[in-house]
Image (cartoon, grey):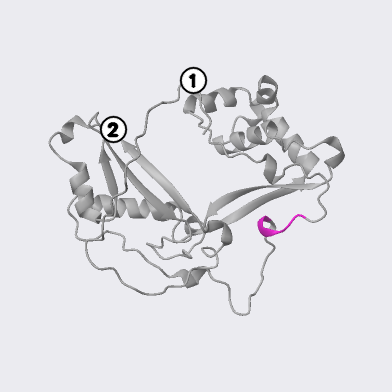
Amino acid sequence: MASSPSSLVFKVHRREPKLIKPAKPTPHEFKLLSDIDDQEGFRFHIPLILFYRHNPSMQGKDPVKVIREAIAKTLVSRLKCGGFLFALRLNHTMSDGQGLVQFMAAVAEIARGANAPSVPPVWERHVLSATDPPRVTCRHRAYEEVAGSTSSILTQDHLVHRSFFFSPSDITALRRLVPPLLSHCSSFEILTACLWIWSDHCPPTRFTNEEMSIICLVNAREKFNPPLLPRGYYGNGFGLLAAVATAGGTFEKANWICFGAGEEG
């Protein structure tokens, strides 16, 4: 994880894991995943640790006991400062980020005394599965393989995973470097353009006619009227949106948005 002068530094002591069994027997059955769930790239677990500050108004109340009894599937630990942390692992084939939010909301409701979540979980994975035989109605640029690439800018040997944190003040600083004509750009657009400029993707001049793409996620839950997915659907409910242009065109547009930031960087 990339660090900065203001990053929080703390020690972590690893202990033996403790299994917390479900509060009651769970169903034993086989369920089919959707075609979006069942992608090779989703077959991994995402570990999450959520930290909660100490709240003086909760003095005498034990969040660990409440949450453990409420869901009986979670691991909650106390912190010396009076706060607590909640840890879990997300299987990405089972749920996306919004599905995780739905799960956390259910935990909170049950912890507050509810007998069941206000939004029941819905499986219904067949909604996002292809017809048999498949019927292609549009072009999906995000899933197309790049044919005849000449640049080979990135290789697996050169890839390094890092996390970067952009605070509101960081976004404000970047926005001050944007030309007035583009002052309406969203934070997402500014960050995307800046990361494009600063990354090793910046194409050499001889590859300006090669197609490049920027791919982002789009939540399918909010894009259809009437809704495509039933309320309570917690599977992967997103699609990939690709903006495709020649390398030179993409670079020039990104450079126009963040040329000042690029020069300062």
Instruction: Give the vertical position of 166 relative to 147 (above or below).
Output: above
Residue bounds of the magenta highlight: 142-146
What amino acid is labelled 1 in the image? Pro
Q: Residue at x 53, y 36 (%)?
A: 163
Q: Is residue 259 left or right of residue 111?
A: right
Q: Nearer the viewer, residue 203 or 84?
A: 84
Q: Residue at x 83, y 47 (%)?
A: 150
Residue 79, x across and y down, in percent: 26, 33
- The image quarter containing residue 27 is bottom left
Work out which residue is located at the far right of the displayed protein and give it: 206
Q: Which residue is mark 1?
A: 5
Dot 2 lies on which element?
A: loop
Residue 203, x across and y down, in percent: 78, 37
Mark 1 → mark 2, Cα distance in angstroms: 22 Å
**Which is closer to the viewer, label 1 or label 2?**
1
Q: Which residue is mark 2?
A: 53
Q: Nearer the viewer, residue 126 or 17?
A: 17
